[in-house]
């Protein structure tokens, strides 16, 4: 006569499997034999179940990143258009030309930052020779640029 494990124990094993896909880990953590852990892993198709969950997570993350990029590009477009519409030039005391917007001096660096950010969002090179960012570095850099731009816009 074969007795099955209580559903709570099976759920506990499933959670352990999600943490680490190892029969021995499940067995140790849930205090069952490796044979029992393997039996329920196969019977309940945990590999397929976890793969399906991971696929859904990746899709959601990709969708969120795509939405973020679209929104950031829209913001950039507004900022660039505003900058170009209000662009002016005046001659400084030292004879150099100074770019202005709304009568205030504007740093070309700010404009350059927006353009580079847009290029990064589109996955293009930002014009710097030999600079290749990993996705994590790119996301972190982009996040910092957005924070700085928001701070500057608030302080205007």
Image: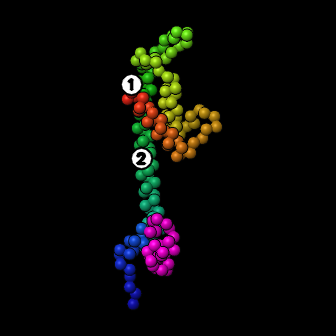
**Quadrant in which the N terminus appears:** bottom left
Residue 19 in view in this figure? yes
Image coords of residue 124 (percent x, y):
55, 37
Looking at the rendered structure, the secondary structure element under dot 2 is helix
Work out whether 100 lies above or below 69: above
Residue 23 in view in this figure? no
Residue 118 is left or right of residue 132, and the answer is left
State the mark number for residue 72: none
Counting the numbered discs, the total is 2
Q: Is residue 20 magenta?
A: yes
Q: Residue at x 49, y 17 (%)?
A: 99
Image coords of residue 156 (percent x, y):
39, 24
Q: CA distance from mark 2 to mark 1?
A: 30 Å
Q: Residue at x 48, y 76 (%)?
A: 27
Q: Is residue 17 magenta?
A: yes
Residues drawn in magenta? 16-41
Q: Which residue is mark 2?
A: 64
Viewer-nearest residue: 81 or 36:
36
Residue 49 sits in which quadrant? bottom left
Q: Residue at x 42, y 52 (%)?
A: 60
Looking at the rendered structure, the secondary structure element under dot 1 is loop
Q: Which residue is mark 1?
A: 156
Q: Earlier in the sequence, mark 2 or mark 1?
A: 2
Mark 2 or 1: the one toward you: 1
- Name the dominant secondary structure of the magenta segment: helix
Q: Residue at x 41, y 47 (%)?
A: 64
Work out whether 88 lies above or below 71: above
Image coords of residue 39 (percent x, y):
46, 78
């Amino acid at each position: 006569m074969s007795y099955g494990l209580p559903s709570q124990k099976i759920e506990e094993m499933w959670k352990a499997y999600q943490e680490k896909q190892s029969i021995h880990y499940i067995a140790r953590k849930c205090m069952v034999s490796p044979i029992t852990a393997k039996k329920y892993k196969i019977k309940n198709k945990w590999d397929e179940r976890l793969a399906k969950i991971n696929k859904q997570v990746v899709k959601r993350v990709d969708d969120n990143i795509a939405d973020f990029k679209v929104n950031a590009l829209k913001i950039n477009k507004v900022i660039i258009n505003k900058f170009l519409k209000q662009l002016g030039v005046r001659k400084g005391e030292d004879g150099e030309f100074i770019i202005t917007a709304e009568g205030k001096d504007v740093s070309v660096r700010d404009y350059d930052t927006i353009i580079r950010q847009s290029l990064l969002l589109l996955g293009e090179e930002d014009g710097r020779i030999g600079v290749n960012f990993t996705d994590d570095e790119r996301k972190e850099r982009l996040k910092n640029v957005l924070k700085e731009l928001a701070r500057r816009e608030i302080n205007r």
